[in-house]
Image (cartoon, helix red, strand yellow):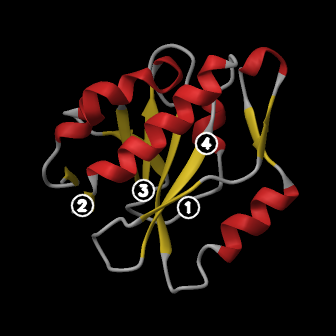
Amino acid sequence: MLRIPTGLLEEARRFFEDRGSLGYEGTAMIAARTPGRADKLVIPNQIAGERGAWVEVTEDGKLELAAALRDGSIYVSRIHSHRMEAFHSNTDDRNPILSYEGALSIVVPYFGLGLRRGLEACAVYRLTARRWVELAHRGRDPVVIQVD
C-alpha cells in the first residue's frame, strides 16, 4: 500500500492547473523515503509540445529528478495530467521513467482539475508483468493507495 498525504496531491493539483491554464499538460514524480509513505512531489523542469499535447522533461529536469533522491528516497509513482480524460496513452505505456514491478502511474484528467475530486477522478495504473494495468476502482483501491 502507498499512503499519499492530501497536501502532496494539493501541490500536484495546483501545478497541473497552473500548467493547464496555459493549455499545457504537466508531469511530476512522487517519492518516498519511508516504504509505503509518499512524502515528496518532484516537479522537474519541462517543456510542452505544440498545443500542449505532450510534455518532455528537459536535461536540467532529469538532473533535478536525480538530485531529489539524494536523501535516500525512491520514486513510487509518476503523476501527470491529460487535457481531457484520464487514461494511459501508448506514449505513457512506453514511458521508461518507472520500470519496476509495482510502480504506479496516476493520470489526472482535465489539466489537473480532476484532482479537485481526489484520486477517484484519476486513472491509476500499476506496473504488473511489464504492463501498465489500470486499478479496477481507480484511486479508491485501499490496498494500493490511501490518501490521508
Q: Secondary structure at mark 4?
A: strand
The residue that disc 4 covers is 27
Please state which of the two labelled residues, at mark 1 or mark 4, is closer to the viewer. 4
**Would you say the residues marked 4 and 3 are in contact, meaning their CB atoms lie under 8 Å apart?**
no
Please state which of the two labelled residues, at mark 4 or mark 3, is closer to the viewer. 4
Please state which of the two labelled residues, at mark 3 or mark 2, is closer to the viewer. 2
The residue that disc 1 covers is 99
Q: Secondary structure at mark 1?
A: loop
Task: Estimate the spatial distance between the alpha carbons at disc 1 and disc 3, rounded to whole Å.
Answer: 10 Å
Q: From what the image shows, is residue 72 above or below residue 128?
A: below
Is 131 left, or right, of 140 in this rendering? right
Residue 89 in sight: no
Q: Residues within 10 Å of mark 3 (few under 14, many from 20)?
A: few
Task: Estimate the spatial distance between the alpha carbons at disc 2 and disc 4, rounded to whole Å.
Answer: 20 Å
What's under tag 1, amino acid-wise? Ser
Task: Estimate the spatial distance between the alpha carbons at disc 4 and disc 3, rounded to whole Å.
Answer: 24 Å
> Could you tell which of marks 1 and 3 lies nearer the N-terminus?
1
What's under tag 2, amino acid-wise? Arg
The residue that disc 2 covers is 3
Quadrant location of the N terminus? bottom left
